[in-house]
Amino acid sequence: MKVVLLGPPGSGKGTQSKFLVDKHQFVQLSTGDLLREKVASKDSSLGQEISKIMNNGDLVPDDIVIQLIVEKISELKNRNIIFDGFPRNLNQATVLDHSLKEILVSLDKAIFIDVNHEILKDRILTRINETNIEDRRPDDNIDTLLKRIEVYKSNTFPIVEYYKKKGILKEVNGMSSIENVSQQILKIIS
Ligand code: B4P
């Protein structure tokens, strides 16, 4: 099974992906994590360029993100994959469709975690407060979050309509508890 998790920054895509990996034999493909690995490796000017873009709340250019993800898709083609944070714009959505078609599989579901944008600030503030200074994400601050929300509205939200038209969109209420959101997702994929 191949599933995309969609939602605004802080809606719980990473949180729910971990649940599916731990309890339901999925592998998680998180472009956020892959990009953070590139930044942490500090081996190139590319890492520094990515770091600046992420810390500003912008989307990393498609060519960089697509290269990172397409390699992994063919490696993992026989596994249940959860796409976390990818696609993030319509171009990435069509690239994902083509990449899956090439390995003769298709996307089963796109799950949209719907949350009120007002609560995103509280969630990120909670995460900042609960994380040691050295482990904090540099893009977890209010100014960057507001930018990430704007970028989400203009670039990522249109994908919801794209998957609706394809007939594979499912929505969950992301305002309830982490456990309840997991149960809603489980119903969709079982
Ligand atoms: P990501 O790493 O994808 O992060 P995110 O969208 O900000 O967060 P997510 O939705 O995963 O929230 P989480 O579960 O952590 O992106 C970071 C950056 O990478 C982007 O801004 C962009 O620059 C770049 N990037 C990534 N993919 C890209 C792409 N495809 N193209 C271009 N650029 C890309 O949850 C947040 C917090 O809420 C946690 O503390 C969690 O505990 C809490 N929480 C979750 N669910 C909850 C619930 N139900 N109730 C209460 N709290 C909850």
Image (spheres, helix red, strand yellow):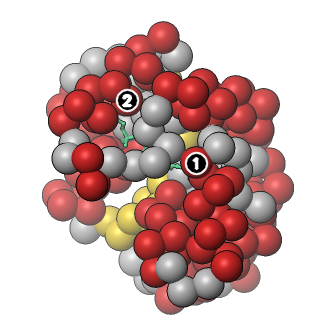
Quadrant for residue 79, please give it: bottom left
Q: Residues within 10 Å of mark 2 (few under 14, many from 20)?
A: some
Q: Position of residue 177 (x, y in %)?
A: 22, 23
Q: Is residue 16 left or right of residue 117?
A: left
Q: Element under label 2? A: helix
Give the quarter the ligand 1 occupies: top left
Q: Position of residue 146 (x, y in %)?
A: 60, 25
Spatial CA distance of label 1 from label 2 is: 14 Å
Residue that numbered label 1 is attached to: 55
| Count of marks placed on residues | 2
Work out which quarter of the rendered image holds the N terminus and state it: bottom left
Residue 168 appears anywhere in the view: no
Q: Nearer the viewer, residue 167 or 162?
A: 162
According to the image, label 2 marks what residue? 124
Relative to residue 117, is residue 150 depicted above or below?
Answer: below
Label 2 near ligand 1 (CB < 8 Å): yes
Task: Residue at 25%, 67% (x, y): give it.
Answer: 25
